[in-house]
Image: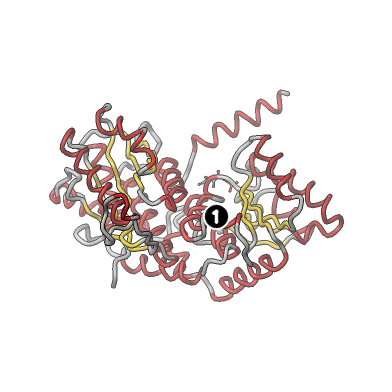
Amino acid sequence: MEKKITLDLSKSQISEDSILKFQSRAKDIHKKLHSGEEAYTGWVDYGVDLSEELISKIEKTAQDIRKECTAFVILGIGGSYLGARACIDMLGNTFHNQIKSETPKIYYAGHNMSSAYYLELLKVLEGEDVTVCVISKSGTTIETSVAFAIFKEFLRDKYKDSFADRIIAITDIEKGVLRPEAEKNGYRTFEVPDSVGGRYSVITPVGLLPIAVAGIDIRQIIGGNRHAYKMYENADLKDNDAYRYGVARYLLNTELGKDIECYEFYETKLKNLTEWMKQLFGESEGKCGQGLFPVTVEMTTELHSMGQYLQEGQQIFAETVLNIENTGAHISIPQELGYDSSWTMEKLNSIIAEGVIQAHRQENMTPTIQINIKDLTAHTFGFMIYFFEKACAMCCYLRDIDPFDQPGVEKYKANVRQIIKKG
Ligand code: PA5
């Protein structure tokens, strides 16, 4: 079976022995994760069990949306939108909204409370045929609820009595307020599986519907996810790179004393993938006074800002470099700069990455993990999502932390509700 991801720990300062010491814990954790008895572990085999009926329904709805609108707006926050955005940015054209295309323009809302953002977006949408997809498992998240209310008003003004035909709701099958509203008004709906939490829900309708609307082949993504399931179905720490990465993250903190993990990427298309990773690891692991604080560093852009700190600042971090082996995009460097015709931007980019890793290691011995990703394809995207989810579950369980709840987030939500109630 071909590996779509390879893990290089040779510059991590973590020895093979340190990893293998966790073999017996890894075995227990693997068993627990696959037992089907732990809350919110439905994602473990959700992709494998996805029915042909649901895949076809997603594809059919996406096809209808692509025909009916020129602009598709995704409303959601955190796990309800980041996975789809990561995929669409990684596989789609960066300038999609500015070019002529059969695929609707894609916009996002519900992920901030910026009045300016909403006013500007609504203005842009005035001349478009708009379909809105609201995604909220709970149906009560304040940012998404406000965005949805604003967009319903916009759609009512534009489409009068048929506004409900312009709405798709992805929410819990029975909990929350969105489901009864959807049923009453006849919105098209999909279900967020009860056993899958927001940040683990990319390979469910939450991620798959918007991804399909963007014209990406979701069967390839599901295929990649199933491929990774098979690849990481064993608990062998000599072999299972997802678990090895989970253990390595744990050791970066507990053995090497690092507090921060910098996700560094040299391919701009990975920007929102690393945002999704930041959420996955940060929200899953940051509990009980523990966890590596995940940050993202966009290269080579930030070599000219954070590069200085990384090289000579406080050595409180480890670096995890996401390296794309074949981006599929090649642009030659004009020879007037003195490069011969063999030089492409991709080649120069990887040489810069190598130079940076070397410099950081020479000066201060920063531990560096390299994650080599085969290519920028839908299959690899589906594979990668599963890799990171499994790695994340492993490092959380090693800390005896529940990877699937977010009690801290609930605290701010409760406070906001309380303040609003008090007027
Ligand atoms: O991972 C999570 O559970 C969170 O990031 C949620 O996805 C986010 O808070 C949005 O929640 P909801 O889908 O209920 O609106």
Rendered residue at 83%/56% (across/down): 159
8 relative to 182 in the view: left or right: left
Give the colour scheme shown.
Answer: secondary structure
Residue 291: in sight, yes or no? no
| Up-down relation of residue 174 to residue 215 (above or below) | above
* Residue at mark 1: 95
| Up-down relation of residue 356 to residue 370 (above or below) | above
- Name the one closer to the observer, 242 or 394: 242
| Up-down relation of residue 259 to residue 139 (above or below) | above
Residue 36 percent across, percent down from the top left: 42, 61
- Name the one closer to the observer, 183 or 96: 96
Residue type for callout 1:
Phe
420 relative to 292 in the view: left or right: right
| Up-down relation of residue 345 to residue 367 (above or below) | below
Specify the quadrant that holds the C terminus. Answer: top right
Rendered residue at 60%/32% (across/down): 414
Residue 100 percent across, percent down from the top left: 63, 62
Residue 118 percent across, percent down from the top left: 68, 40
Q: Residues within 10 Å of mark 1 (few under 14, many from 20)?
A: few
Residue 162 quadrant: bottom right
179 relative to 363 in the view: left or right: right
Q: Pick out the residue farthest to the top.
A: 422
177 relative to 231 in the view: left or right: right
Residue 55 quadrant: bottom right
Residue 234 percent across, percent down from the top left: 28, 64
Rendered residue at 18%/33% (across/down): 364
